[in-house]
Amino acid sequence: MEQECPVFTLILLCLIIEMIQGDTVTQPPNSTLVKETENTTIHCKYDLTSGSTPNLFWYIQDLNQPPQLILSDYSKQEDIPPRFRNRFSASHDKTEKTFHLNIIAAVLSDSATYFCALSPTLHLWEGVSDIIVCPCQHH
């Protein structure tokens, strides 16, 4: 008896909003299939023309819900909401200017829209990533 594995469709839409100073955050367009319980990474790249120190954030927006903060560059594990704690983390590479969101053991409830943001523009969504999860079907 073969089981079809659930698949995550990761759709990254490229939405770049430039601040007055010219600082930007980009999530490159990409689609990725991820099986349930597998790990995945949502990419985010930033560019600072203002010379400021970046304060980076990841948000999640569940269907028909307002965006919720997952974590920031300075979050400790205990600061991360329980739903994401120990499974969600971000890797900040200041040389490459990236702030990727890492998801360990993806689950169906991870289906949502993900936003990478660069402060002080928390009211602007510079990048969008949709994860759509399909339930497992048994034969």
Image: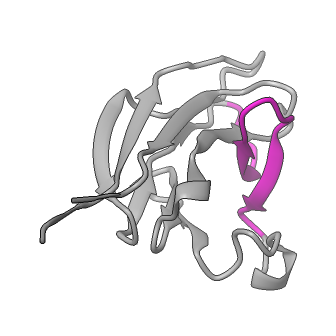
Q: Position of residue 88 (x, y in %)?
A: 60, 69
Q: Is residue 68 left or right of residue 38?
A: right
Q: Position of residue 21 (x, y in %)?
A: 74, 22
Q: Is residue 65 left or right of residue 113?
A: right
Q: Is residue 104 left or right of residue 111?
A: left
Q: Visible in this render: residue 25?
A: no
Q: Position of residue 5 (x, y in %)?
A: 27, 60
Q: Position of residue 72 (x, y in %)?
A: 75, 60
The residue at 43%/52% (across/down) is 135
The residue at 75%/58% (across/down) is 70
Residue at the far left in the pictured view: 1
Looking at the image, residue 56 lies above or below residue 92: above
Looking at the image, residue 126 lies above or below residue 35: above
Looking at the image, residue 123 lies above or below residue 4: above
How many numbered callouts? 0
- In-front residue for pair 138/86: 138
Q: Is residue 41 left or right of residue 15?
A: left
- In-front residue for pair 40/47: 40
Residue 49 location, quadrant: top right
Residue 24 location, quadrant: top right
Locate the C terminus by quadrant. bottom left
Q: Is residue 68 magenta?
A: yes
- In-front residue for pair 74/104: 104
Locate the N terminus by quadrant. bottom left
Magenta stretch in the rendered image: 50-74
Q: Is residue 49 magenta?
A: no
- In-front residue for pair 106/74: 106
Q: Visible in this render: residue 64?
A: yes
- Which colouring convention does the figure follow? one colour
